[in-house]
Image (cartoon, grey):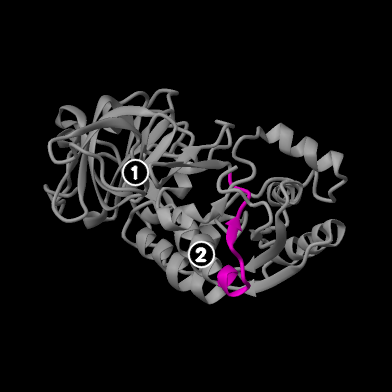
Amino acid sequence: MMPDPKNRKVILGLSGGVDSAVAAVLLQEAGAEVQALHMTNWEDEDGYCSAAEDLQDARKICEQLKIPLHHVNFAKQYRDRVFQYFLDEYAAGRTPNPDVLCNREIKFGVFREHAKRLGGELLATGHYARTELVDGETHLLKGADRNKDQSYFLHAVSAAALAETVFPLGELQKDEVRRIARDHGLPVHDKKDSTGICFIGERPFREFLGTYLPASPGPIRTPEGSEIGEHLGLMYYTLGQRQGLGIGGRQDAGDEPWYVVDKIAADNALIVAQGKTDLLLSDGLQASATNWINAPPDGLASGYRCKAKVRYRQADQACVVAAGSGDSISVTFDEPQRAVAPGQYVVFYDGDRCLGGAVIDEINRISDARSDIIRAPGHLAGHG
């Protein structure tokens, strides 16, 4: 555990779930003066957000562990700094990942500032990640539990914030965390892990997104130009998607599944292909809004060899990353990658160490495969 929380005032982000509850136990056992801070970041009472239940669970945990509980509402900051970006990206036809911004702007942004106002010397969370101090620099490392590792979502957090943060679960497996919760009789020991959009919860996605952005139905086309259906709105689809297309069982096609292979914003057209297709493969990408946790790697100007993920839970992929103009970079993969989605993040690793990441802007499809897509009148030949 780094830095050492012993005899220091630690403000723990307590969600009301099992991970942060066990983090509280471990901090107490490490000799920290623990205080809990629970955030409310979404206020719509529509039956899907579990904010009220989570606050009650946080109170039960604090009562049992005899630690103070503070409660703060960051709903405005969340909407302004995270949710608006989420909507803007979907409106632009991209596929955002709000959890990355939520960490940077909320959990390690306004939350961190509030923790300092409470007199906190250190911040703690229930993330599955680790840090280490190397030659005066704080490095972010993957969590020991590879199935739960959350370094991907933490790549945009500053080194300064990481230097003041304790990740008590970093060396643990999830089943160990559940066991500790049971052994201590924590009321949330069997509580289901939260999923869905950060702080918004699990809900029917199309219905939710449609309340904020107008849906614009349009044609579903094959790469050869045949119109085979109608989509509900480009914002509801991402590259590689096969569920929810509504085009199965066609008499003029086989039984292989259909996949989204492109979105043509200029024509509001969704392009789909059947079966295994090179149209979903790319050997590189361009990205921007790059964040290096520490200094940019040496050799970035000519090309730096490392590994990368283009989605959470993906195995690390060998690549070369090179600096572009401003905060842009280009990435070339050793092996073609499937269904890389603009708007998502490419995150870089050197072994266990997370180096940073960037927002994917464009992808380089292999063998100019995308030129095989026949465009109806009005298609933009240079569309990325």
Tell me which residue sits at (43%, 69%) in the image.
81
Q: Amino acid at mark 1?
A: Ala
Q: Which residue is mark 1?
A: 341
Mark closer to the chain start, 1 or 2:
2
Q: Are marks 1 and 2 in contact (CB under 8 Å)?
A: no
Q: Which residue is mark 2?
A: 106
Q: Marks 1 and 2: which is nearer the front? A: 2
In the image, residue 196 lies at what x, y percent? 58, 51
Regarding residue 244, the answer to whether it shows in the image is no
Residue 121 inside the magenta-drawn segment: yes
Instruction: Look at the image and give the residue range highlighted in magenta.
Output: 114-127
* Nearer-the-camera pick, 33 or 307: 33
Quarter of the rendering containing residue 129: top right
* Nearer-the-camera pick, 275 or 324: 324
In the image, residue 250 lies at what x, y percent? 42, 32
Q: Amino acid at mark 2?
A: Ile
Tell me which residue sits at (63%, 67%) in the image.
39
Q: CA distance from mark 1 to mark 2?
A: 25 Å
Q: In the picture, which quadrant includes the N terminus?
A: top right
